[in-house]
Image (spheres, rainbow, N blue to C red):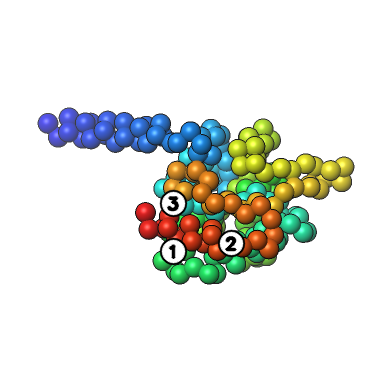
């Protein structure tokens, strides 16, 4: 009898998790089906980010201009929040330069150069260029590699809800980020 109950619970759990995956909204970026790798070399899918609000930006770590400004802006956003709110969301930096931004270089950048709290920050990339492009298109982020191997790209910081749907965005430096902070506070209460 105990085995049947355990099997029944297992089926309920498995069915429930499959139902959750199917319930993602159509405009969720977590619909992008692919394997990504983080700074620890851990593979995951975007839908694994589900459950917490997420600040997401696309960067490359050898950038000298825009990307450091984007990361500093996210740190400035973070500094204006209470500890409780900070612990309610995650930050994901997606590299569009997987050749140079390997897990080891992402970890070194996060810990040594930027002193990022890796309990809340996650640096990720994908070896499949088409999946990076798919995410860029889904988030309206533009980038192009130049003849020197560097990139021209847009400035973007997104706030996603728990299901990966864009709730707020900053598309340039020195913009008022108070509306994003307010939306993040609202999402942290859900």
Left or right of 93 in this view: 22: left
What residue does disc 2 label?
177
Image: 74 above or below 33: below
Q: Residue at x 50, y 59 (%)?
A: 120
Please state which of the two labelled residues, at mark 2 or mark 3, is closer to the viewer: 2
Q: Residue at x 47, y 48 (%)?
A: 161
Q: Residue at x 48, y 57 (%)?
A: 183
Q: Is residue 45 visible?
A: no
The image shows residue 125 at horizontal and vertical percentages of 63, 44
**Sequence order check: which comes first, mark 3 or mark 1?**
3
Regarding mark 1 in the picture, which secondary structure is present there? helix
How crowded pointer 3 is (Cα within 10 Å; few <14, some 14-19, many 20+) is rated as some
Q: Please tell me which residue lies in front, 91 or 142.
A: 142
The image shows residue 73 at horizontal and vertical percentages of 63, 63
Image quarter where the N terminus lies is top left
Name the disc covering residue 85, or none: 1
Q: Mark 2 and mark 3: span between their CA atoms?
A: 20 Å
**Sequence order check: which comes first, mark 2 or mark 1?**
1
What residue does disc 3 label?
52
Regarding mark 2 in the picture, which secondary structure is present there? loop
Q: Residue at x 53, y 39 (%)?
A: 29
**Sequence order check: which comes first, mark 2 or mark 3?**
3
Please state which of the two labelled residues, at mark 2 or mark 1, is closer to the viewer: 2
The image shows residue 84 at horizontal and vertical percentages of 41, 66
Name the disc covering residue 36, or none: none
Regarding mark 3 in the picture, which secondary structure is present there? loop
Image quarter where the C terminus lies is bottom left
Left or right of 135 in this view: 30: left
The image shows residue 63 at horizontal and vertical percentages of 76, 55
């Amino acid at each position: 009898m105990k085995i049947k109950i355990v099997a029944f619970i297992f089926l309920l759990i498995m069915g429930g998790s499959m139902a959750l995956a199917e319930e993602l909204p159509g405009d969720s970026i977590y619909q992008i089906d692919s394997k990504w790798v983080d700074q620890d070399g851990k593979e995951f899918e975007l839908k694994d980010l589900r459950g917490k609000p997420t600040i997401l930006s696309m960067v490359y770590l050898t950038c000298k201009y825009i990307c450091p400004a984007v990361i500093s802006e996210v740190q400035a956003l973070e500094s204006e929040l209470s500890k409780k709110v900070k612990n309610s969301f995650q930050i994901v930096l997606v590299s569009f330069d997987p050749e140079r931004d390997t897990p080891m270089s992402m970890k070194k950048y996060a810990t040594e150069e930027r002193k990022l709290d890796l309990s809340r920050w996650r640096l990720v990339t994908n070896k499949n260029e088409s999946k990076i492009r798919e995410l860029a298109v889904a988030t309206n982020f533009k980038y192009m590699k130049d003849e020197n191997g560097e990139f021209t790209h847009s400035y973007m910081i997104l706030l996603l809800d728990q299901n990966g749907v864009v709730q707020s965005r900053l598309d340039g430096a020195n913009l008022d980020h108070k509306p994003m902070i307010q939306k993040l506070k609202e999402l942290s209460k859900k």
